[in-house]
Amino acid sequence: MRTGLKKVVDDGSWLALMSPFLPNLERLHLSVPAYPYGLGTMLQYVPNKMKSADALSPFSSLAEVSLASVDDIDCPSFLLLDVFGLPSLRKFSGVAIIECSDDDDAAIMDDDSTSGFSAVTHVEFQSSHSDVCFRYLIRACARLESFTYEIGIDDNYDEDPAFLYRELYQHRNTLEEVTLSKDPRNNLATDDYQLLGSFSEFFVLKRICLRAGNLLRPDGAPLTELLPSSLESLSITEAATGGANEKLAQQLKDVISVAGARFPRLTRLRIQDPWDEDTEMDDTTYSMAAEYEAIVSLKHDCWDAGIDYCIANWDVKGCFWKERHRALDRSSCSRPHFPAALLEDNSDMGEIFSGVCEDAHG
């Protein structure tokens, strides 16, 4: 049967044919050049949708579905909604999903019947893009516990995920994890991000991973007022964009200083791409170094507060996150590896580095 599935063009038709005979199937992974329309048609025959009196409910035990697109082909919005209608489904993962919506899709998703009909609790999109559909998928969930949206590597897409906040807010009593970031292989950088909104009323939210530009603004509310008291882990990505470094260190220092009283469960702090220590120094990067050192020095504040801290930079050649300055071993000095010329030209910075090293041993 595996050989047969590989040779046919429309695997969705095979799945539609076999689905009534797989009542115990719990996990399904689809890797397709385009959404299988045969499967989409079959998904209409599920509880609470069109159902034949004589038909067996397809995928009655299916708990997890992952859909990976191997080609850059748009995925119509209503087909994703059909997947979310599976009654036993709890987790949906999409990889390289490029969603498109037309007027007919918008009419379908504006219908109140698309709200709260899905039993899905965990939603994850990796290297994907959405115009409008993802917010309707959030709204479709009756009880959302985890949501991840990583914007894809296509440089044409770098939309601001702040438009999802209103729908996420509807799940503030159940949501435990939120990740809104971009694929690190996406080199498109923009400073034009909107403030996402406060998470202080998300009463069970434990893990947050957000772009710095969606959290911090010179005229925005302090970070201590944006985070929930239930927070356990905070990751901030793209920390060097939008001038975020300028106030990031002080904002995080304030969070750490009140963690015992306001964020008693906070045990992990991770800063991604604040600045790469291997960057070639020039007049432009000199000014960034002092701000970066302030972020590095947070290691010692975290140590005192019992918080695991690290800085991570994306290694382009190796395609992995390179972690530095973990707040695990205070016996060693984690002095940033800046070129010697920088320290010679900036004596004040050299004094800062020395002070940090002395504190680390003291």
Image: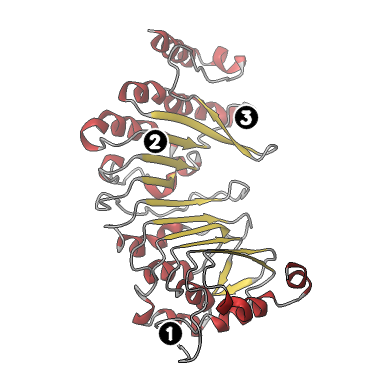
Q: CA distance from mark 2 to mark 1?
A: 49 Å
Q: Secondary structure at mark 3?
A: loop
The residue wearing badge 2 is 248
- Tell me what residue is drawn at x 39 percent, y 51 percent: 177
- Tell me what residue is drawn at x 56 percent, y 12 percent: 344
- Return the mark for residue 49: 1
Mark 3 Cα shell of 10 Å, populated few (<14), some (14-19), many (≥20): few
Q: Nearer the viewer, mark 2 or mark 1?
A: 1
Quarter of the image that includes the C terminus: top left
- Write down the quadrant of residue 294 in the picture: top left
Q: Position of residue 124 (x, y in %)?
A: 49, 58
Amino acid type, residue under disc 3 in the picture? Thr
- Return the mark for residue 279: 3
Amino acid type, residue under disc 1 in the picture? Lys
Mark 1 Cα shell of 10 Å, populated few (<14), some (14-19), many (≥20): few
Q: Position of residue 129 (x, y in %)?
A: 55, 63
- Left or right of residue 214: residue 305: left
Examine the rendering and report whether any part of residue 132 can be seen.
Answer: no
Amino acid type, residue under disc 2 in the picture? Leu
Disc 1 or 3, which lies upstream in sequence? 1
- Of 304 and 16, nearer the camera is 16
Q: Position of residue 149 (x, y in %)?
A: 49, 56
Q: Are marks 2 and 1 in contact (CB under 8 Å)?
A: no
Q: CA distance from mark 1 to mark 3?
A: 56 Å
- Tell me what residue is drawn at x 50 percent, y 43 percent: 238
Q: Secondary structure at mark 1?
A: loop
Mark 2 Cα shell of 10 Å, populated few (<14), some (14-19), many (≥20): many
337 w.r.t. 49: above or below: above
